[in-house]
Image (cartoon, rainbow, N blue to C red):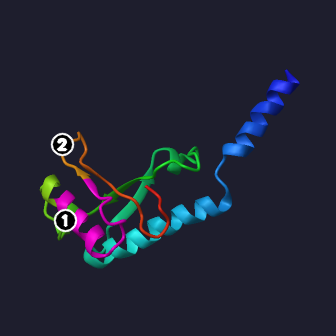
């Protein structure tokens, strides 16, 4: 049993995110938050999923949600229009690698997949 326990610990040390990987992800969130806050003051960009829980693998993508105050939002209330507006911001501000933006409007919750131009994170 001790050998199995040590193998599990060794595997965890091998796959666990390193401090610099955490810093890189936090930098992506900070840059995106600043970009969207210029357009929509008071909005909040929040991580969820494996990254937020601290259970992500080094090659894992990040799941983020942009929250606004609907009553005073400058964003269009239609989810599909908002999706394409955010797409245009990510493209215009050169946040995403050119050609990596993939809006998925027909998902249960509309999402945009992209690769960050600075870090290469998805």
What residue occupies the far bottom of the structure in this picture? 38
Tell me if mark 2 has few (under 14), some (14-19) or many (20+) residues whose alpha carbon lies within 10 angstroms of its own: few
Give the residues drawn in magenta, as a range.
82-102
Q: Are marks 1 and 2 in contact (CB under 8 Å)?
A: no
The residue that disc 1 covers is 85
Q: Nearer the viewer, residue 36 or 15?
A: 15
Provide the residue designation for mark 2.
106
Q: Position of residue 90 (x, y in %)?
A: 30, 68
State the residue at coordinates (52%, 50%).
51
Q: Quadrant of residue 122?
A: bottom left
Q: At numbered mark 2, what does the secondary structure look like: helix, strand or loop?
A: loop
The crowd level at tag 1 (other Cα within 10 Å; few <14, some 14-19, many 20+) is some
- The quadrant in which the N terminus is found is top right
Tell me the CA gap for discs 1 and 2: 16 Å
The residue at 79%/31% (across/down) is: 7
Residue at 12%, 55% (x, y): give it: 78
Of all residues shown, which one is farthest toward the front?
99
**Element at badge 1?**
helix
């Amino acid at each position: 049993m001790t050998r199995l326990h040590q193998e599990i610990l060794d595997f965890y040390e091998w796959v666990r995110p390193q401090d610099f990987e955490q810093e890189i992800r936090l930098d992506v969130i900070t840059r995106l938050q600043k970009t969207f806050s210029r357009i929509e003051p008071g909005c909040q960009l929040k991580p969820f999923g494996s990254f937020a829980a601290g259970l992500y693998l080094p090659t894992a993508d990040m799941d983020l949600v942009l929250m606004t105050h609907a009553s005073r939002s400058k964003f269009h209330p239609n989810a599909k229009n908002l999706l394409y507006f955010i797409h245009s911001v990510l493209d215009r501000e050169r946040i995403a690698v050119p050609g990596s933006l993939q809006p998925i409007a027909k998902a249960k919750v509309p999402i945009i997949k992209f690769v960050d131009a600075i870090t290469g994170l998805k």
